[in-house]
Every structure is written in C-alpha cells, then in structure tokens.
Amino acid sequence: MKFFTVKRICRAGVIAALYVALTCSFGYVSYVGILQFRPAEALCLLPLFYAEAVPALYIGCMLSNVFSLYGVADIFGGSAVTLIAALCTFAAGKLIRETAGRGGQIVRVGVGGLFPVVLNALIIPVFIVYIAGLTEGFGTAAAAYGWNCLSLFVSQALWVYALGAPLYAFILKLRRRGVPAFLDGKRESPREIHS
C-alpha cells in the first residue's frame, strides 16, 4: 500500500491544524502558568493509530510555538521534543499490540502517553529556565527547573490522559465500526486495525 495517500495527507493536515487551533486559541495560558492550558496535547496519542500523526504533531507544535514567549528555542527545541515523543508513541503502538480486551488498550494508552508526558516535563523546563532564564521567585535555577518539571508533568498528564484517553477510545470505536475517515483503504477487521 502506498504510504502517501490522499486520506493520510488530509488526516495529517487536519491533525496539525487542530493542534495549532487548540493551542493558539487559548493564547498566553497555553505557554505559561502553573498548569499550561494546552488541550492540543490530547492529540499526542494519535500516533498509536496513525503514522502520519508524527509529522503532523511536529508541524502543529512548531507553528503553535511561533507565538511562544520562549522564542526560537521553543519553536525548534519544543517541536523536536514533540517529534521525539510522537516517534516513541508510534513505536510503542507498534510494539504493544492489541491484546485481549480492554486491558490491552489501557496498556497501549498508558505506555504511549508516557512519552509526551515525561519528555516534555524533563526537557521543556531546560528551555524555560536555562535558555530563557526564567527563575524569578524560585531563588535558584535548580529550584525553578524542579518546579517547572512538576508543573509540566501535571499539565501534560492531565491533557494526554484525561482528554487524550477518551479521544483514543472514541477513535478506536469508530475504527471498529469501519468509519472510512478513520481507516486506511478497505474496511479493516478489528484484528488488522492495530497491526
């Protein structure tokens, strides 16, 4: 099967556009604060289904970060973190096949979601604290880094799991029903969906 089908290109465009819209529509609170208001991070589970979600998330994040307060480091560095996390989530989706029932899906979501949560929580504070130099109110750069790690971990986990997991379940349901927009090519059996 040819990889660059019209459906996959369109799906990638929709994912990237949704990421930008869901980030930029909340303005300032998408980039700063104790808890970043970034519901677009729910889309980070889509590589469990679609390979084209990997570059789509990267491009969507890069375009969104043009408006970030952290400048070029966030545009390129933050987007690179999203790309690495998306690649890891995609690989996890390939390695963790659908197992018997609901438990297999919970494992896929749990493991697949770890990458955007943990990588963002550990790496993005480097840009915030050590590159942008935002340490006000923390005393030391180490304290600022630790606080930002915790804050981003909670923010990412909230969006990836609380919003992303229901999105995952909804897409899985549509794929099992054979809704063409969520499948590639001919109608697939539930067994083929995760191969």
Image (cartoon, helix red, strand yellow):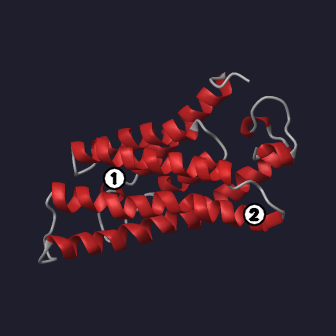
In the drawing, does residue 56 fall left or right of residue 186?
A: left
| SS at mark 1 in the image | helix
In the drawing, does residue 180 fall left or right of residue 89?
A: right
Three-letter amino acid code at disc 1? Gly
Q: Nearer the viewer, residue 54 or 19?
A: 54
Q: Nearer the viewer, residue 166 or 124?
A: 124
From the image, state whether disc 1 or disc 2 is nearer to you: 2
Residue at the image point whose x is 17% and y is 59% from the top: 130
Residue at the image point whose x is 75% and y is 47% from the top: 194
Residue 46 showing in the rendered view: no
Look at the picture and state if 78 lies above or below 58.
below
Three-letter amino acid code at disc 2? Gly
Which quadrant would the C terminus be assigned to in this image? top right
Residue 114 showing in the rendered view: yes
Look at the picture and state if 184 lies above or below 80.
above
Residue where numbered disc 2 is placed: 104
